Amino acid sequence: MDIINKLNPSTSALHEVGQRAECIEGTRKEILDNIMNWAGDGSSTTMTGYWMCGMAGTGKSTIAQSVCLGLKRKGLLGGEFFCSRQIEECHDYHKLASRNAKYQQALCDVLNEDLQLASKEPQYQVTKLLIDPWKRVVSRGESPFLAPVIVIDALDECRDISLVLEFIVPAIKKQELPGLKFFLTSHPEQHIKKHFDLDAIQQDRLYVQKFYLHNVEKSIVKKDISLFLGKGLIGLGISKDKLDILVERSGALFIYAATLVKYLASGGHCASSRLEKVLNVKGSPDKIQTQMLDELYTQILSDSLDKLSPEEQDQSIRIIHTVIMTGTPVSCQIIADLLDYKVQDVKATISELQSVLYTSGPEETI
């Protein structure tokens, strides 16, 4: 343990630490069943990587928490890392920890040979701290019958994650980690998406399964959010017609539904008046109603805009305003025409904000 501790793994990134929410019973059932079936499939044709991508607020981390709990019950949780930009040690890619005892011993052997590995760059760490030790476990015949799963949630919240994905994704693709699976989640940001590019992967064989959470059929999401709100607000005696309005307001965003539950359930004697405010909102709602959403979107916009020059910031903000003010989805070309901008500049802004904006359909409407 002294040797392992020199790696300084993050304990705050484990699924048991903090108040991580799991899926309410009965929600996300089909999604969770598909993931657990993939995790428990020991056939040689099973893809060894699973990337779940979803826009901000669609419930990726809650699903990842439920996956960890399910894997742990089945003895298949090999390790986990819940990235978070709010916690320093949770957005440092050097600090991933594993739960596998055999791998841990092999890792100690490697570290005894070179203790400086803990501070080296991803190219060396992926090879020397992950691939080589795991191969030692496999060569000794000590790998488990069913592949343990490493869960890494919110890749987009990990600093310089592209440096790691540049080496881990090819290792998964080339089957350099036999008997080990990876379940990864992230926003659909360009610097992450490029590592899972479907065309490039299909040139050989598809080793990474891709699932877009924001593309789940609206009726399924609506049903899950209805169940979530119904259970979360069960003590408030809200009628079905009013609950249906809250479901419609939530759209596909579980974080909005969670914000509503927190706002209404904590209202005490004011719960009824708060409900009426939400149902009859005209103009801007009270700040407390949208605090979680405001924090999420502020962070995403700041990450995107802060790295631009003042002129580029102004251009991006004008593009965002225009996208919102059109009221109905239009193409990048139409936005460019309205603002007299180059279409590639509009596309660049949309690409940087794929956590909250995305294009779809033949005309690529935003």
Image (tube, rainbow, N blue to C red):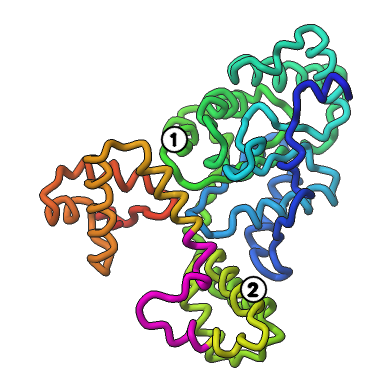
Is any atom of residue 5 visible in this view? yes
| 9 w.r.t. 246: above or below | above
Q: Quadrant of residue 161?
A: top right
Could you tell me how far apart the alpha carbons at marks 1 and 2 are, in whole angstroms?
33 Å
Between 246 and 271, the one nearer to me in the picture: 271
Reading the image, the residue beneath label 1 is: 191
| 26 w.r.t. 241: above or below | above
**Mark 1 belongs to which amino acid?**
His
Reading the image, the residue beneath label 2 is: 228
Residue range of the region highlighted in magenta in the rendering: 276-294
Magenta segment, prevailing SS (helix, strand or loop) = helix
Q: Quadrant of the N terminus?
A: top right
Secondary element under disc 1, as helix, strand or loop, is: helix
Query: How would you rate the neighbour count of disc 2 (Cα within 10 Å): few for under 14, some for 14-19, many for 20 or more?
Result: many
Secondary element under disc 2, as helix, strand or loop, is: helix
On whether residue 199 falls in the magenta region, the answer is no
